[in-house]
Amino acid sequence: MSNRPHGQHVYIDDDYPQALGICDVTGFIFLRQDLVRQMEWRGNALVWTGLYVGRPYVSMPNEQNRPPISFPDPRAIIDPRPQIPISSLIPALPENQRLAQLQSLGFISQPSNGLPVT
């Protein structure tokens, strides 16, 4: 064991010494083989952020950074025809018949103009 203090994440074997590296997130000293690339989602691919991080401090890439899945628009109808409103197909009732119909259904008690309904 060497006499230089290296912290809790490093064990140096005197017979087989290895390179050291510094974690870009915490600043702790690690063996170089224990440093991994920090990845994140950019678009639909995992991309290296350029940071080397110690294994205990690697954060998982967040799925919320991925773009949402979008589906194509439906195919257009070749010869569309506008919808005809139902009110144009049914003839309008005269005023007195409409009021009589509303009165028979119980919506109004007497005509609004005070005239008897015929």
Image (tube, helix red, strand yellow):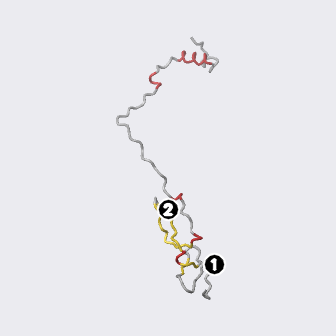
Residue located at (42% from left, 30% from top):
83
Q: Is mark 2 on a helix, strand or loop?
A: strand
Residue 75: x and y in percent read 39, 41
Residue that lies at the very extreme toward the top in this rendered image:
118
Label 1 crowd (10 A; few <14 / some 14-19 / many >=20): few
Q: Do the residues labelled 2 and 1 touch (CB within 8 Å)?
A: no
Going by the picture, which residue comes out furthest to the left?
A: 78
For the C terminus, give its image quadrant: top right
Residue 8: which numbered mark, if any?
1
Query: Where residue 67 appears, x then y in whole percent?
Result: 48, 56
The image shows residue 22, relative to residue 77, as above or below, that is: below
User: Where is residue 82 drawn, in percent x and y?
Assistant: 40, 32
- Mark 2 vs 1, N-terminal side: 1
Vertical order, 80 against 60 (above or below): above
Count of picture labels: 2
Residue farthest along the front direction in this orientation: 15
Q: In which quarter of the image is residue 115?
A: top right
Between marks 2 and 1, how big is the CA–CA gap?
31 Å
Disc number lying in front (2 or 1) = 1
The amino acid at mark 1 is Gln
Residue 41's disc number:
2
Image position of 51 with respect to 44: above or below:
below
For the N terminus, the image quarter is bottom right
Which residue occupies 56% across, 73% down?
A: 54
